[in-house]
Image: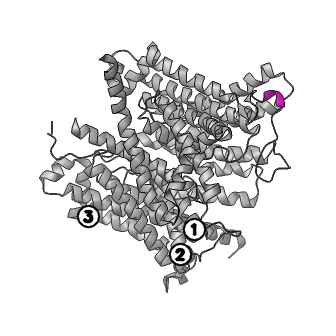
Amino acid sequence: MNEFWLTIISYAKLILLTIVPFVLAGQGTMLGGRTGIFNVAQEGIMLVGASVGFLVSYLTRSNELGMLAAMLSGGLFGLALAYFTTNLRMDQFVIGLALFFIGIGLSTLLPKIVIGVTLTPPLIPTLKEISIPVLSQIPVIGEIFFKQNALVYFSILLSVGLWWYLYRTQVGMELRAVGENPQAADSLGVNVTRSRYWTAIVGGMLIGLAGAYLPMVYTGTFTENMVKGRGWLAIALTFFGGWKPDTILYGALFFALIEVLAYRVQVLGTAIPYQFLLMLPYLATILVMVFSFRKARVPAFLGQNYDREKRAL
Amino acid sequence: MKKSNAVFSIARAVLPYLLAVLAAFAAAGVFIALMGFDVFKAYGTILFTSFRTPNGFVQTLLKFVPLVLQALAFTIPLTAGKFNIGGEGQLLVGATAATVVGIVFANLPPVLLIPLVLLAGVLGGALWGLIPGWLLYRFGINEILTTVLLNFVSFNLVNYVCTGPLRDPGAGHPTTLAIGENGWLPMLVNNPPLHSGILLAILVVAVVYYVITRTVSGYELVATGANPRAAGVFGINTRWMFIASLVIAGGVGGLSGALEVAGAQHRLIEGMQHNFLVLGLIIGLIAKGNNLAVPFVAFFISVLEVGASAMQRTLMIPVEMVFIVEALILVFVLLSDLVQKRVS
């Protein structure tokens, strides 16, 4: 195989590796949205996930425990969001922003308390590549798809699983009904409150895990504001993924492609200053919004709070 | 009788805030105590650093300038029902424009250069507010995401300017050369140093309040925010109100950047925006979007911020602790709203 093909393969592999935070945060957002809970705290929850995941991995030397802790902390944010919006019926956007602020603060506070200021950045082991037996031996495809870290496999399987759950099972259909018309779902015996709680919590866990991916795969350490807008990009992704697990997975490929372009092309050296390349993910997202947002299909009850005792018109 | 009524209504409005502040301090106090620090010493430092020395008070005023403008950049569009989360980008683009003008025209006399530097900042910020405004106007694209994403674009712009053509080779951190001394804002007080930006900030607060409460356009803005459909029926061009509010907010955000350049730093420094955006949002939300309440809340938050730095220096408690207190105050203010609604 010549040089050219090897480069192509390595880029394809890199793009697949880069989809993970977008897929996890996107699916987490989608899941909550399917019951009407519009989470806007992604950026903050991802920061907390990155911070907690890093700290626990650092202290225990175990990435698995780190990921678990990141999911737990993300789940707590989801729980808070569910409580404030479902029980107290507060404005989802405003309380989401408040949780975002708390997330920013906690994410930098925790490392300062636990580790303190060090001269060299404290490092954690990065996620190992897992080769799938037999499949990884297939030329080209094996190299791209079957020699990745565990979370790459997980995020793809998760997307398939969520699609199956939402579109091929009875309970999944009932869940979708909650996000479209909770009144109707309620009258058919679906527990609206319970579905809002679990989707917000599991959604938060996925978003937290998305944050933990950054120190565990990209940097090996936690730095302030390391999420760099990926949480906000995940919201955009969810919108033009039409709040569907399958299209969110494809959309994540697009985001990963742009990110890989932006970060890797500067290594090749171009006439364009690299800062302008780094603007690409954000500018491309705005551009895509121009073309796709009006067509996007959104759960009808998104961002609203359900009051059982209120009269239906 | 009438006077006591007014006092009563003010007390009724302020009381929930006091309770929210107390609740937030109590909640964070538990955390501080668990970390093994002296809670009362910490809170004493946070609350009184601003009032113990002239320097502390001047520091507070210097913090107040960008914070009050950032908060207004959020609440002005909020009056029309739109969320501007892009104050940070507007500050940075304004600061960049101000710096470029201040360096290129360094030889102009102060009478010309100071207004030019400030104007460049306002226009730069307004341009950064115009982009999401236009996208909203032309394509109906939600402004929340576009304003946020443009912040990240501006970070890279600042990094380019600070490491590229205008770089100060002597500085270790990405920084530009200083702007011409003729572009520096005059000092109000020399020791401790307080630049005259505070006067402009107060002027902006007054003008915003006057325009929104006493003019027709201000009323149209409020009407648009209260009920865009009804406002549209009565002949208000609501889409135009949206774009105008975002451009004006951008200008105010840009001014905060220009004042940081012309008054405080005299150059563009990467990261000079600190956490002004988020604090501005917190201020605006605690003030519940009320433009008159904004300066008071902004002053209070400035006091906390100056106290936070002092606390980190003397007691080694990380400044982020206070940031969490501020976010908790917001949460408790929102909760107190809920309680009031249930009671009434």
Relative vertical location of residue A310 with respect to residue A46 in this rendering, above or below = above
- State which region is magenta: B175-184
Structural distance between the alpha carbons of marks 3 and 1: 36 Å
The residue labelled by disc 3 is: A168
Chief secondary structure of the magenta span? Answer: loop
3 vs 1, front mark:
1
N-term mark: 3 or 1: 3
Residue at (54% x, 30% y) in the render: B249
Mark 2 to mark 3: distance in Å? Answer: 37 Å
Q: Is residue B30 left or right of residue B189?
A: left
Query: Which residue sits at x=63%, y=33%?
Result: B256
Q: What is the chain letter for disc 3?
A: A
Q: Quadrant of residue B277?
A: top right
Q: Earlier in the sequence, mark 2 or mark 3?
A: 2
- Name the residue at the bottom extreme: A133
For disc 2, the chain is A
Q: Is residue A254 left or right of residue A3?
A: left
